Image (spheres, rainbow, N blue to C red):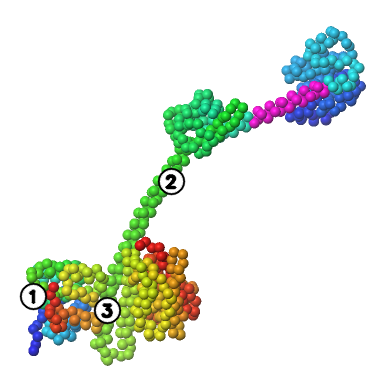
Amino acid sequence: MTDHPAQEAVQETAPQDSAIRLLLVDDDPDNLVSLEATLQGVADQLVPVQSGREALRHLLDQEFAAILLDVKMPDMDGFETAELIRQRKKFRHTPILFLTGYRNDDHLFRGYDLGAVDFLFKPIVPEILRSKVTVFVELARNSKLLQEQAKTLARAEERFRSLLEAAPDAMLICREDGMITLVNSRTEDLFGWPRELLLGRHLTMLVPEWCHIGRMQGVELRGLDRNGKIFPADLTFSPLQTDEGLLMIIVIRDITERKNAEQNIRSLNADLERRVALRTAELSRTADAMRQFAWAASHDLQEPLRTVLVYSQLLERRLAGQLSADQTQCLNYLSDGAKRLDLLLGGLRQYIRTTEADDRGLAAVDCNEVVRRAVENLQGPFQAADARIQIEQLPTIPAVPALLLQVFQNLIANSIRYRSDSAPEIRVTATEREREWEFSVTDNGIGIDPKYHDRVFGVFKRLNGSAYPGSGMGLAICKAAIEQSGGRIWVDSELGLGSSFRFTIPVEQGQ
Amino acid sequence: MMAPLSRVALLEDSAADVYLVRETIATLQHPIELTVIVDFEAGMAALEDGSLRSFDAMLIDIDLGKGSGLDILRRIRAEENGTHMPIAVVTSSDAPRDKDAAMRGGADLFIPKPMDYDLFVTRVGKAIQQMLGMDGSAPRLA
């Protein structure tokens, strides 16, 4: 006997299949056909077989909501078949309905003895058969549903357990009064107690400082392990309303490492601050040493320079009228070079003085007065160039007077020095901005190519070489003076279109 | 009528500057005998043997290599007993702190060496005349 394909398919899918099946056993094919017709639609699947043996084979791998068993069959009758079925634990409770033509008490007793739940007497009344079988099908359906629900619950429980066990933190469930009802394995690891010694104990055994707290996150308390070691812990409490009353889910995290890391960061920061302070002091010493060096150098260089300068003049005087034009030129180069070096050293000394200035000389300075004095100091160049200056109403600001005078004087001197063919026209303005004043000294001079705008503020920087006199320190001194006062200086200019030097002075200086 | 000879000491280690001082004295209408003390050690020796006391006026340079002219100035003032020799400190430094130190040390005049020949001759010449009372004023006494 070979199975037909449909049965194979059923067998394959059987274990996870929730179909409700009925096993119909009768040696008479005609009876089977009429049973099938009667029960059509009652169950999901009807499985007709013609012998007890065949029935048993189906029972090996399939479940049935009920078995309809013909009593009178050749080879193995219905009772024998039922007896064999009942021997299997799995089918001990599967309803068996006997189909019989005899209404005889022995028959019935034997049948009930073998676990029959009912007898149906031939000829079968289709309505009765249908309604009886329907009851068993419904029972089977409900029981399957219950099994499914139980499985789902078991799976959910399993997932909950594995989640709880896999959690990186200790997790506990406590009653409202603090009695521990559930812990995960991380709790055992963290506190060193096996879970059987924790269940039923009080939470204060692990967290002595605990007192009833509602929903709370990130509470820092101290944990106490079995060896008496105390460690910092972060606790989260979530209340959970259940049939058994209010429970608390408690998550405990050992934050020893975090605390150590925080401590490390604090000490690293402190160390960093200390090192920055040391380095700053070192740099400040270096800067002082550099300034002292520059100062000494600019003075010590002055001494031999003076000798060169004075003796070239003396030589000129002694040899006046005796030298050829060529020799006179040589002597002129000598003294011009010495004079130029003198100018550079003078600028350098002034620059160093400017960078050394501090705010001890800070005073309320009337800028109108400062600009007037600068113009006065530049009387000679002003008259020589036929320059004109327009000074707008300027404010009184907190500044070091000498520095501010130096700035205005250098800027105005530059306006005259770097004049164009037309007579210099200079304009000085001031605009109040947020927390600072912005000043400008604008001229109609030769202007500066924007690519040199930063360069002009450098030390010993002269864009035009010896064509114009000067130490190359004027703007560097202005920059040092303005920065010393906490301001900024820059230039707006185009070649041939004049220059506008601008600088700011903050008005909230320490007084 | 010939004025009496004045004796002036010059404590200066730069031969070039000694020459300039000689040039300067040559321009003055007064007989002056200039004694040059060429370095710090010579200055200390002159202090020791008392020879400095015989001068009518003195010019002292500050930077003398092995020591400071100001130290010698202070020694002179410390050893003076009721007398006062006019002394000008002549130096290439124009630093305010050098001037302060010179004046505190007992200098009568502080003269930064000018970067110009004419100015040098004028300024140093004027200082010598002032110290010797040749400019019509009385010799400078503290």
Residue at the image position 36 percent from the left and 68 percent from the top: A364
In the rendered image, residue A136 lying in the magenta stretch gets the answer: yes
- Over which residues does the magenta segment extend? A133-156
Disc on the earlier residue, 1 or 3: 1
Q: Is residue A120 above or below residue A439?
A: above
Residues at marks 3 and 2 touching, judged by CB atoms closer than 8 Å: no
**Does mark 2 fall on the same chain as mark 1?**
no
Q: Quadrant of residue A109?
A: top right
If the image is split into quadrants, where does the N terminus of chain A sit?
A: top right
Q: Could you tell me the amino acid type at mark 1? A: Ser
Q: CA distance from mark 3 to mark 2?
A: 62 Å
Q: Which mark is residue A453?
A: none
Residue at the image position 88 percent from the left and 22 percent from the top: A127
Total labels drawn: 3
Q: Residue furthest bottom?
A: A321
Would you name the residue on which mark 2 appears?
A265
* Chain under numbered label 1: B
Q: Is residue B71 above or below residue A335?
A: above
Residue at the image position 30 percent from the left and 68 percent from the top: A295
The answer, for residue A272, to whether it is visible in the render is: yes
Would you name the residue on which mark 3 appears?
B115
Left or right, A30 with respect to A56, comes to right
Q: Could you tell me the amino acid type at mark 3? A: Met
Describe the element under mark 1 as helix, strand or loop: helix
Would you name the residue on which mark 1 appears?
B54
